[in-house]
Image (cartoon, rainbow, N blue to C red):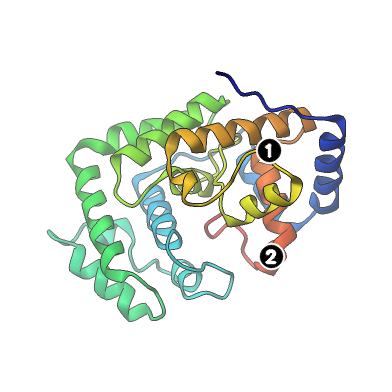
Amino acid sequence: MEFSFEITENDIARVKSFVRQHENGRFVVERRSRNLTESKLEITKEKFWKAMTGARLTSVQRSGPQSPVIRFLSSQPFPLAYCRVCEFEKPEHFIRSTLVNAGGIRFSNRIAEDLSANLEQLQSGAWKQTLADCNALRSATSPQDERRAADHIRITFKGFGPKQSRNLLQSLGLTRYEIPIDSRVIHWLKDFGFPVPLSAAALTDSDYYNFISDGVQELCRRSGVEPCIFDAVIFSARDGEDWERPNILF
């Protein structure tokens, strides 16, 4: 049995109208300049580690512009910088105490455990494939390339499902097609009349996530908008203009 998304001219017109309303917002302009540029900086261990930390922190708690998580990620110097955590033979305690001392960050024990395990995984050999996948996305990509990179993150690292693996890649400016289908996107798609059920729980299944992502990408393709811009427009329409620094994480 096969399923195909039937996209009407009215659907296309609605998407185009929605994008036009918000395409000049600061958040959308920032996303366009980072994710669609032809010249992207190399992804280093330091950059990937901070993006991984940010994506893991935001997966289980509010991450609005004034939230404790965003204040923590904006700290200079970054308290959990790669060079800093590597100073510890067993960094879990340091990560946990740093998160607790920051104040307001939930699930510090679980996050510290996951990040410590992921650091060990990276240092045990996962850096090579991870950085190769990321840096391959700096040039022209396909949806399949991005999905393979997201799958590597999902399979390799603790605390990363389909959504957060894409959130990590998007925060690095590497994705054009694969987007994190979060609560904002789910609400928009439901209001739009997306033809299949949507829930955060169902989207933890990678096959179902890919199925929904295929539908979103087809809607964007037919509407002439890059999925990463479509995602930024949804974000901007809800609360993107409240951000002083849109590129902290997203």
Could you tell me if residue 32 is visible in this image?
A: no
Q: Quadrant of the N terminus?
A: top right
Q: Position of residue 66 (x, y in %)?
A: 57, 75
Residue 85 horizontal/vertical position (percent): 24, 61
Return the x and y of residue 114 as percentages of the image width and height: 27, 56
Please give the residue where the numbered disc 1 appears in the rendered image. Answer: 195
Disc 2 crowd, CA 10 A, few/some/many (<14, 14-19, 20+)? few
87, 66: nearer the viewer: 66
Residue on which disc 2 sits? 239
Q: How many marks?
A: 2
Q: Identify which amino acid the numbered label 2 is placed on.
A: Asp
Q: Which image quadrant for residue 11? A: top right
Q: Secondary structure at mark 2?
A: loop
SS type, badge 1: loop
Residue found at the very far front of the displayed protein: 1
Along the viewing direction, whichever of 197 and 218 lies nearer the viewer: 197
Q: Is residue 153 left or right of residue 25?
A: left
Rendered residue at 75%/36% (across/down): 225
Q: Where does the C terminus fall, quadrant-wise?
A: bottom right
Q: Nearer the viewer, residue 237 or 91?
A: 237
Whole-number angstrom distance, CA of label 1 to CA of label 2: 26 Å
**Crowd band around label 1 with a 10 angstrom C-alpha radius: few (<14), some (14–19), many (20+):** few
Q: Which residue: 70% across, 44% down?
A: 230
- 221 vs 250, left or right, is right
Q: Amino acid at mark 1?
A: Pro
Rendered residue at 77%/56% (across/down): 25
Q: From the top left corner, tell me how far across and down residue 178 is, in percent.
A: 56, 37
